[in-house]
Structures are given as C-alpha cells and as structure tokens.
Amino acid sequence: MSSIETTRSLGLIPFNFHRLDTNNIVAASISGDYIFLKQNELCTLLKKPDELSSKLKNQLEAKYFVAPEGRLKRSSLRLIQSRIISKKETVLGGVSLFIVVPTLQCEHTCQYCQVSRSLNDTNYSLSKKDVDKIAEAVFQTSSNAITIEFQGGDPLLRFDLIRYAIDEIDKKRSDSDKKIRFVITSTLHQLTAEMCEYFRAKDVYLSTSIDGPAWLHNVNRPIPGKNSFERTVEGIKLARDLIGADRVSALMTTTRKSLNYANEIVDEYIRLGFNEIFIRPLSLYGFANRNIKRLGYTVQDFLDFYDQAFNRVLYWNRQGVELREATASLIFNKILSPFDAGYVDLQSPNGAGLATLVFNYDGFVYPSDEARMLAETGDQSLRLGEIGEHLSHYRNHDVVKSIVASSLSAERDGCKQCAFNNYCGPDPVSEQAQNGFMGGNVLETDHCKRNKWFFDYFFKKLKNADPCDLDLAYQWAYPAS
Amino acid sequence: MRKITALTSGFNQRVVARICHLENIQNEWRSDLNFIVKIEDSKSLELLLKLSEAGVNNVWPMARAKEILSSWAWEWVVTDFDFVFDGDVVATHDGMNHVHVLYREADSHHTVFLTNRCNSNCLMCSQPPTRHDDSWLIDEAIEVSRHIRDNPKNIGFTGGEPLLLSDDLKIVFDTFFQDHPMTEFDILSNGRLLSDSTHAKNLLRDLKANVTWMIPLYGHVEYLHDFVVQRYGAFDETLLGMLELHSYQQLIQVRTVLIEPVLENLTELCEFIGRNLPFVREVALMGCEPIGFALANRDVCNTDLRKWHSSLQESVRILERYRVPVVLMNMPLCVLPNSLKKYAQKSISDWKQKFLPECDGCAEQPDCSGVFEWFDPSKELTKLEKIEVVQYA
C-alpha cells in the first residue's frame, strides 16, 4: 500500500435536502452533518457520486452522505450512534426543567396573556402541602442538572410560597449531588431588597420581560399606573445591585405593535445592558387565541420582523457589543454543535413530559407551560395527574406516550422527508392547541412554518457568513459560560 | 535514550539499578532493588566492602577508573560519572560498553519504552518498528517503576505500539500506578487494538492509573489515514479504539503529524474531529521529526510549514469553534504566524533539542521548541530565521 490512489466506488446513505435558491442546496445527513451543494453537484451526487471531485467526495464521506459501496464502517455507525445520543441528552436524561406555578395572580392585564388573574382572586394559588410534594418530586428525577422555574401569574406576589419551596428543596439537596438552579419569571415590580438578599444566598436567577422601549412595553403590559416599564427597570437595577450583574435576564414578546420597531427593541436591550435577547412570537396559547384578530399577525409578519431584529443584533456584535439572540442560539446549537445545549425546545421526541413538567397552582401536573395554559382555556386533556404522584407516574402517562409517539421527526409524515428533521421536532402540544388533537398535517402547523423558515434563514446566513460571523455562530451554539 | 560509555563487569544479564549516594544508601536500600553508588576514593569503597561483608549484595560501585576498584570482587561499573545523577535509573550489561539512562530524575519529560514492534508502518515513523520478540522490555519497565524513588509528575509510555503487549500492558499500568499513585501517565498508541471491545474491557475496566492516550489521526476519510499509516482498516480501528477509550472515561489527546498528505486535508480533519470526537481533551498538531522513515519518505514528509500558514490558522480556528483545545508541537516559533505562536509548546526534550546558528540572539528563543537534534538545515525545506522583536497576536 504505497499509493494514495484508491479505486473506491461510493454508494449513497439516505439523506434529505432543502433548496435555498435555484442553484443552492443544503443537504443534511443522518448524523446531523450538513453540506452546501450546487444544483449540478447534487445531480451528480445522486446519479454518479464517483464522478464528483475528490475534495467533495471526501467531505461527503466524512459527513456520512456516502460510503464506500454504500456501507457504513463499524466506526461510522458507532460515531453516528454516539452523536445521536449526545444530541438527545436533554430529552432522554430525565426531567430537568420543573416549572412551578405558585399563583396565577398578576397586577398586569396584558391582552395577549389573560391566563393571569387579578390580585383579588385569591383562589389561584398553590397550597403548602402541594409545595411539600413538589420538593419530594424534584429529587426523583434521574437528571443531575435541574432547573426549577417559578412561573405565574407573577410569582413574586407569593414570595412566601417561593421561599417555602426553595427552603424545602434546599434542605433535601444536601444529601443529593444534583445541581439545582432556581429561576423566577417575574415583572420584578414586587422585588424588595430583602428578597434580593435571599435570592443571592440561594443562587436564584431572575427572568423578566422587556418588550422594547418604554412606550411599547407600557402599551403591551398595562397596569393601573401605566408605568410597568419603569417599575421593571427599577427591579432589574435592584437585582443587579444586590444579587449580581449576571443574575437577571429578559425576554420579549412580539405584538402587532412591535412589528415596525425591531431596531428600537434591540437597542433598548443594549441600553439596559443585557447580553441576551429572546425575540419571541406571540404565543397562541391561553386566552391570546381569542384576541388573535386584534393583536395577532401572520407567521410571515413575525419572520420579517425577526430578520430585522436579528440583523440589528448582528450589527451590535460587530461593534463589539455582545448580545446573543436566543432563537439563533438554539438553532445554531442544533446545527453546529455535537452537544445538546439543554434547551427543551425543538427536541424529538418532544421534551414535554420527558424533560419538562409543570406543577400548577391548581394541584395538577402538566407536561409543559403551554399545556397548563391550554387547561385555562378549558382543554384539560393534557393533565398528567395530581401533584403528589411519583415522577414515573407522569412520565408513563398516556398523554406523554402520545406526545412522544407524535413527535418523532424521523417518523412523522412531513418531518421524515424534511432536511431539518435532525435538528427539529414536532410540537404536539401546540397541535392540540391549534387543532384540538395531536398529530395531523405537520406542515400546516405554525410551529413547522416558523421553524422551517428559521432553518432556511440560518442556513443562508451560515452559507454567506464571513469567518468572524461563523465564530459568533459557533460561540452561540454552545451555552454561554 | 541517553547512553553513557562505560566499562562493566559481573553483569551477565541486563540489570536495572538506581544511582544512589553512598551516604543515603541506608535510607534508600531495599533488598528487592539494585543500587549503584559513585565511588570517588578508596575510603568510600571500604564502606561499600563492609556492607558487602554484612551480606548486602545489591549495591555496586561506579568509579571513574578501574584502579580504585581493585579490591572489589563483584559487579562494577567504570565510567566518567559526571553525566549520571542520584535518583537516575540505569540499565547495563557486560558487552554493551555503555550504561542506558532509563529514567533521569531531573527531567521534566520521562519516557518508558515498552516495545519496538508495531502494527502500523507510518510514512514518517521516527522509530521504525522491528519484528523480533522484545518482551524483555516489559520486565524492564516494571523494574524501572520499582527503581524510581520520587513521584514524577508525568511518565510517558512509548513504543512501537504498546497495545501489542496485550494483557501485560495492564500489569505495567498497575505496577506504575501502585508505585507512583500521584503520577499522570501518557501513552503513545494508535489505539487500533482497542477496537476489540473485549480487549478494551480487560485493559480499561478497572484501570486506576490516570492515563492520557495519545492517538494519531491523519485524515477525515479512511483512505487518507490508512495511507499515512500504511495499513488498510487502521482508520476504522483507531476510531473504534477512541470510542472504547471514551466509554471508559479515558482522556484522549489526538496527535497529528503534519506531513504533506495530512496538511492537504487538515481543515477537514479538524472539522471531523470537532463534530465526531468533541470529547477529546486536546488536539496536538506536530511538526515531523526528521529521522527514521521520515528520511526515507522525504517527498511527503519534508515540508515548509510557512507554506501552510493559512491552513494551520483555519484548522486551529475550527477546533476552537468546537471548543477542542489545540497545541502546536515541534514547531520553532519563527516558522509560525504570530497568531499561532501562543499555541506552540516547548515540546522537544532537552536531550533531543538544538538551535541553529541563525537562532543566535533570537528574541523568542527562550520560549521556542527549537528543532530536533537530527534536523539538518541543508536538507529541510522549513528554514529558521532570527526574530528581532517578540510579537504575539
């Protein structure tokens, strides 16, 4: 064996592809590797792969699009297997996100939410007995790194319950080696110095909402004093001073009014000193569906808005101001990193029930945040049982089985032919919200339309990226350190 | 391996011994080890003779001249012992005409040689394999472990292909771990024999020693790697070996020697590593050592690294994107672009390293690996040059 010349005949390994434009294609292999091809290269690859240039043939082989004689080596099979396993770590590693809803009470009367109840409605809070049971359940998971996220309503309205829950969990964590992170999602209007001291001691992170500049935020999130923005910003400042500069993050919700102000919204995040922004579409769930005509917009409207906002985010990064966009981070993690960054979104099987459980104020457990919101609108079919059962009870519930069965991207019609199915997965809970049942035509779901657009969008970005842009994309593909 | 010219007597077979100061012999002496003490004069020899009369038969003299030892009737060594130090572990045998220094306490890199046999036949092999049975090296390695008196930070095992020792490799590991539990071990192996999961299990299942496996990879596709190591199927086996190692939580450093066919595909190889082997601890990109087969295969091994700057920069960038740490070894700083100098290590052991006349007064010499002793500037395409001012990107 002295010569590098070999006579190898290459055969195809099944793969999917997506047309970016008339002449450009992105193809993705079973391992999650991707390659950009020209139209003529794709045709040659499909008909006579041996006639491609050596450079391209080698790349295709190293990315598992082709193999000598069409047979994958033992090492290739093992590598692909171990890569798939590491990409499924979040969904297969046990429940890692426990969402606890201590109360539905909230001072705000946001039109697009309406899950929340006014301060006078005192029936919408978790009982202490249920909190005890939740503290038990947390330690039943096989996952070693868990997040406990308090949602609402505005959970800080029931700081007493949060404190009780964190203390109870803290007592038990001493004889466990689990890494536990607490997150509270709140307007921060009720935040006090005393709470901050406690949160600092207990390693608690705060997540809040900033929809953009003051006027936009205040229109989106009405309270009697018309000063929601100012009070949230005060809360952010207090938290940064007393808990730590890196302990507060924010996300935004896009309403119809946001659509023309992409730059202003991103700039507001810069002004407030955030290093991450999460540009989210309006959720269909909860009561928002009823107001969709007034508040809503098409998937395309949102995506046009996203494009503008994303370019603004890039603009700031090029100025040397670090700002991550969370959707882009998620997509880049899927495409570029061999590791799973731990997001519960875009998983196959879906993370609802496997990686996420919601312990709701109503005494019931749900597979996801969207599922408990759906219950508020009257569809309680996704309930997994009362708080107090062993975790395995929820995990083995028929609802979770249905979610799993209908979220396998390699099997669902519409998904299995999709070039992005390695990076994506259907969202049965949103199907339930949209159609009243899980399953149906995936291609007609907003979830699919939006994410297909995202993959197309980011593959185009990657294709045209200069080396510095690529560095940024890879940086975002891994969790921020 | 260092050799020191010597005249010996009484060593009918190869023995391993520790160099020990006469004053310390009481503290260091053990019945199951051998010691050689430096004898400067007849007075110290008398002390040794007394020990011998008392029945101590494993402490032998080493003198500068045979005359000093005239009253000594047992094993002895005569050599100019300025180059042997207390704590060194040496081997000798009558008829060798020298003493091998197997372990030098003062070194920062320690190497234990396990076999000269190999199941690959790399184009640039610096130590071309032989076929004969050299299993005596295993016993010698175990002797070396027992004779080392300190707890070195690091010991490297090398060959040949150490996995050819089969189950005996486990004995070597276990011995070294038992004698030196705090030491970190490296092993240079192509990993191929670990593709047999039973073999991997036997070796790795209860392995207590802290071992880093230094495994070579030369291509992102089978035929490129197999060509460089001159064995069909080697790529598949090496990858399977790495996966076995990973499944037993072993640390892996990928080692890639930069010869022409490797450099031509280096960026793709790094991409392959980043996506398929992100668990490796580090990738070492290494300049070729101009000795052994590298001299026989000059057409592919002799390369001017300056020609490959952009490929090297891109490769390092790719590995960093995948968060795989990277080091550059055996590359003098003057052949690297400024942006890559921070990755370069002073990787060439003192006794194999040299600088050239053009290095005189070079500002970067203190941080530079230099070149291998056998680097012949008239034949190598990579040229060195003096750097006036240190510049790091």
Image: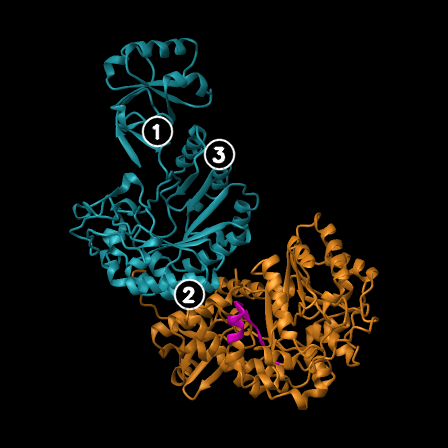
Chain colours: A orange, B cyan
Q: Mark 2 Cα within 10 Å, few/some/many (few <14, many 20+)?
A: many
Q: Which disc number belongs to residue B271?
A: 2
Residue nearer the viewer, A481 or A453: A481
- First to last magenta residue range: A267-281
> Sequence order check: which comes first, mark 1 or mark 2?
1
State yes or no: residue A338 in magenta: no
Residue nearer the viewer, A84 or B299: A84
Q: Residue at x 48, y 51 (%)?
A: B194
Vertical comparison of B52 with B347: above or below: above
Q: Residue at x 55, y 50 (%)?
A: B248
State yes or no: residue A273 in magenta: yes
Numbered disc in front, either 1 or 3: 3
Q: Which disc number belongs to residue B91?
A: 1
Residue nearer the viewer, A22 or A306: A306
Q: Which disc number belongs to residue A36?
A: none
The residue where tag 3 is placed is: B180
Q: Which chain's residue wears label 2?
A: B
The image position of residue B33, as x and y in percent, is 44, 23
Q: Which chain's residue wears label 1?
A: B
